[in-house]
Image (cartoon, rainbow, N blue to C red):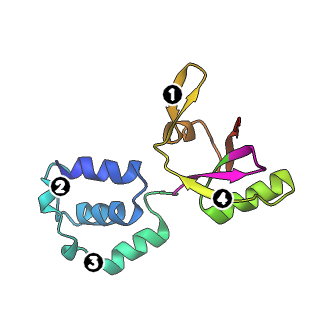
Amino acid sequence: MIVKDVYLDCLRFEESALAHCIHHLLAEKKISLDDDISKIDLVQADHQKVRELIQNNVLGIHKVGIYSLKMNQKEFVFIFAGSKQEAIQFYTKTFHQTPLNCHEYSLDFQLARGNDVISFRDMRKEFESIPAIAGCFDRMY
């Protein structure tokens, strides 16, 4: 595997710290995109500069998760949000009640939508702003 693949995976999976570290090492020409990943030596990074890159979010990474919030014994709502707390606040503001619980799901979890299957990661691309309601689920007993 080459550095470019790892870097792209970091961006795709929103691994901010590693992405910014690779970005720094690339900028300092300590590695190149075509190098084997074994060339990535995090000790070579100036950790103060990497910390500043992360704080300034130069790569524009905004981690988003998917949360299931229980409305009642049968109904759940899925919300894209930056944190569990943000999901609960958005739910409370939207539905004027506190959820019974809140659990984070994997963005790679797949669900049926119509005749197709879609992951939450792919569904997230359909939303321009976060937090947002991804959908509701009614559990049949």
Question: From what the image shows, is residue 109 above or below residue 21?
Answer: above
Q: What's under tag 2, amino acid-wise?
A: Ser
Q: Is disc 2 surrounded by few (<14), some (14 to 19) or many (20+) residues within 10 Å?
A: some
Tell me which secondary structure the magenta stretch mostly adopts.
strand
**Distance of mark 3 from mark 4, alpha carbons?**
38 Å
Q: Which residue is mark 1?
A: 117
Considering the numbered disc 4 on the image, is that residue within a helix, a strand or a loop? strand
Q: Nearer the viewer, residue 115 or 123?
A: 115
* Among the two numbered marks 2 and 1 on one chain, the one whose residue lies closer to the N terminus: 2
Q: CA distance from mark 2 to mark 1?
A: 37 Å
Amino acid type for the residue under numbered disc 4: Cys
Residue annotated with mark 4:
102
Q: Quadrant of residue 54?
A: bottom left
Residue beneath the point at 82% across and 51% down? 94
- Cα gap from disc 4 to disc 2, whole angstroms: 42 Å
Helix or strand or loop: what does disc 1 sit on?
A: strand
* Earlier sequence position, callout 4 versus callout 2: 2
Q: Which residue is mark 3?
A: 46
Magenta-drawn segment: 63-77
Residue identifier under label 2? 32
Q: Nearer the viewer, mark 2 or mark 1?
A: 1
Q: CA distance from mark 1 to mark 4?
A: 24 Å
